[in-house]
Amino acid sequence: MTDNTTAEPIYLPNAVPPTNHGHTVAAWTAMIGVMTGALVSAVGCLPGVPFVLFWVGLVIALAACVVGLVLRNMGYGQAKDGVEPKRSSGH
């Protein structure tokens, strides 16, 4: 038998805190919108394409950020003080 009296004790938390690493409706909506806006802006920088698309892409990205904030405040994002998160019953 091995003598375990000199072994170092292990300190573990009682449970792992719940996290979702940004996998929320608000985060996905904001990211897809920002990526779409960046793509439209990039196309607007190409020669022969109206430069107004660059500004349209920036407006799309800004609107996506606002929509993401609104969704988070509605409870579809990371939990924060004063907002009860809405969770689907499927997971």
Image (tube, rainbow, N blue to C red):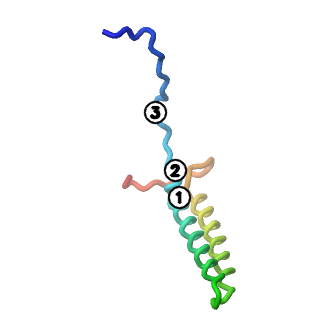
Q: Which kind of residue does numbered mark 2 sit on?
A: His
Mark 1 vs 2, N-terminal side: 2
Closest to the observer, 14 or 85: 14
Residue drawn at (56%, 49%) of the image: 79
Cα–Cα span, label 1 and label 3: 24 Å
Q: Position of residue 67 (x, y in %)?
A: 60, 67
Q: Which residue is mark 1?
A: 76
Residue drawn at (37%, 8%) of the image: 3
Residue drawn at (34%, 10%) of the image: 2
The relative height of residue 12 versus residue 86 in the rendered view (above or below) is above
Cα–Cα span, label 2 and label 3: 17 Å
Q: Which residue is mark 2?
A: 21
Residue drawn at (64%, 91%) of the image: 48
Label of residue 15 in the image? 3
Q: Which kind of residue does numbered mark 1 sit on?
A: Tyr
Q: Quadrant of the N terminus?
A: top left
Q: Which kind of residue does numbered mark 3 sit on?
A: Ala
Q: Nearer the viewer, mark 1 or mark 2?
A: 2
- As helix, strand or loop, the secondary structure at mark 2 comes to loop
The relative height of residue 37 versus residue 86 in the rendered view (above or below) is below
Pointer 1 with pointer 2, Cβ within 8 A:
no
